[in-house]
Image (cartoon, rainbow, N blue to C red):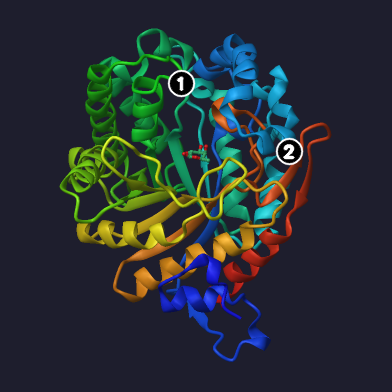
């Protein structure tokens, strides 16, 4: 039976809309991924480790009450009803988070059990270098144990060096608005490359530069809440140079490792393809969201990445024209097809591609399995058309602290009980585990 409501044009997806019940579907297919494909999930230190001391922790305490008040207008009535936690200040304070700092062994046992052969996490700069030039040996040792714990389980680490949080001393000098950021970050990257020489093959310098640029310096909702397009342009420059320099310093330690950055891309479509203004809006959007940073780091990437969350049907002066037929708990449109178009575009750069984040908030775990399978279906299609995609990391391994939104959005393959820190594997995680084991998606 066809699901008419979805109005899916593509043949592959129509099969998908029929469901994934292999035995009932004579047309069921096996989509086999290239051998050696990396399967995993992502996290970021600030969102899972707990007990941080960085620019975000300071900001959280100063802004929790305000965020509680704003929740009334920011979220739809159904979201307010479903997630009353959004009205508690402690929702907005990362605090102990998932206590992964102490529980990484337990979490990596889960990673292993779920058949992941790769895992992405970040090293927290504020732990390693709490004051300028003072490097904390104890914390270096901690992260060495973290990496070794992955290696001992046969899991390939993908290590991010800057997932948005700054040591307080970096924040006080202006974070990535100060040119000195470039030197300090490249120095930190070099130290990490040296300390973890032989243990890490894949380094991701900067996470989603354009998200920070837009949320911190254009809309001004994230720390340091500076709304200034000129500063935003400066941050493009500083973050891209920080990446380029870190690329050099990491490679000065080892030629054998691979260096890239974690890049979020947005799939933009003109509402009216024959409208010059709609098309122009898409062009401008594509330049700032999808191309500018890649251009500025040209020649400094051993591989490219894709982090995909958003698709927008764009009209002139009106961004959100989405159909929103299926949305996540955050109200973000579920639009797996976008991943295909973005992969096709990235393919033009002729570098290997890893999907380092793709996921949705779904507390009831009702949409996650289909979301993952649909996203992989579109990824497979891009691979079939010659795009060199080598890995997929779902966001996230575990529920975690979702920045200015706090704990209520639940992205995890694994559910966290924040009172007891108990981990509970969601059923979609088990479906994904089958895919990882068989290197195959069955539709
Ligand atoms: C990405 C971030 C990640 C997480 C997901 C939901 O933009 O990189 O930390 O917040 O969104």
First-in-chain label (1 vs 2): 2
Residue that badge 1 annotates: 221
Alpha carbon distance from label 1 to label 2: 24 Å
Residue that badge 2 annotates: 82
Toward the viewer: 187 or 442?
Answer: 442
**Helix, strand or loop at mark 1:** loop
Residue 264 appears in the picture as rendered: yes
**Residue at position x 23%, y 24% in the image:** 233
- Left or right of 31 in this view: 64: right
Q: Quadrant of the C terminus?
A: bottom right
Label 2: few (<14), some (14–19) or many (≥20) C-alpha neighbours in 10 Å:
few
Picture layout, residue 136 above or below residue 401: above
Picture layout, residue 383 above or below residue 137: below
Picture layout, residue 34 above or below residue 117: below
Q: Is mark 2 within 8 Å of ligand 1?
A: no
- Left or right of 112 in this view: 301: left
Q: Quadrant of the N terminus?
A: bottom right
- Residue 71 is situated, as x and y percent measured from the top left of the image, at 62, 24
- Left or right of 367 in this view: 422: right
């Amino acid at each position: 039976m066809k699901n008419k409501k979805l109005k899916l044009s593509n043949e592959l997806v129509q099969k998908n809309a029929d469901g994934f019940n292999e035995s009932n579907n004579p047309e069921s297919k096996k989509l086999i991924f290239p051998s050696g494909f990396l399967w995993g999930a992502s996290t970021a230190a600030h969102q899972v480790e707990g007990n941080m001391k960085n620019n975000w922790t300071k900001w959280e305490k100063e802004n929790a009450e305000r965020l509680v008040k704003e929740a009334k207008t920011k979220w739809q009535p159904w979201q307010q009803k479903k997630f009353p936690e959004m009205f508690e200040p402690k929702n907005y304070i990362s605090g102990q988070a998932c206590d992964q700092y102490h529980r990484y062994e337990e979490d990596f046992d889960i990673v292993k059990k779920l058949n992941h052969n790769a895992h992405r996490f970040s090293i927290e700069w504020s732990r390693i270098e709490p004051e300028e030039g003072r490097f904390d040996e104890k914390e270096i040792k901690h992260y060495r144990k973290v990496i070794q714990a992955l290696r001992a389980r046969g899991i390939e680490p993908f290590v991010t060096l800057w997932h948005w949080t700054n040591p307080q001393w970096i924040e006080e000098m202006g974070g990535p608005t100060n040119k000195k950021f470039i030197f300090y970050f490249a120095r930190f990257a070099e130290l990490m490359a040296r300390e973890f020489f032989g243990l890490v093959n894949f380094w991701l310098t900067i996470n989603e530069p354009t998200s920070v640029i837009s949320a911190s310096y254009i809309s001004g909702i994230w720390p340091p809440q500076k709304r200034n397009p000129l500063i935003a342009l400066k941050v493009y420059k500083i973050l891209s140079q920080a990446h380029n320099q870190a690329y050099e310093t990491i490679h000065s330690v080892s030629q054998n490792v691979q260096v890239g950055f974690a890049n979020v891309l947005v799939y933009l479509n003109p509402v009216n393809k024959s409208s010059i203004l709609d098309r122009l809006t898409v062009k401008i959007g594509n330049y700032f969201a999808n191309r500018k940073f890649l251009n500025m780091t040209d020649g400094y990437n051993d591989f490219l990445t894709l982090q995909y969350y958003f698709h927008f049907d764009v009209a002139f002066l009106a961004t959100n024209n989405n159909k929103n037929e299926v949305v996540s708990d955050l109200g973000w449109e579920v639009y797996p097809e976008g991943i295909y178009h973005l992969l096709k575009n990235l393919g033009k750069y002729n570098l290997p591609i890893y999907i380092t984040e793709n996921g949705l908030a779904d507390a009831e775990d009702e949409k996650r399995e289909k979301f993952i399978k649909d996203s992989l279906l579109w990824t497979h299609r891009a691979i079939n058309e010659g795009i060199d995609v080598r890995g997929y990391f779902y966001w996230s391994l575990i529920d975690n602290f979702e920045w200015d939104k706090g704990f209520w959005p639940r992205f995890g393959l694994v559910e966290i009980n924040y009172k007891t820190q108990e981990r509970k594997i969601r059923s979609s995680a088990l479906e994904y585990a089958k895919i990882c084991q068989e290197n195959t998606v069955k539709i």
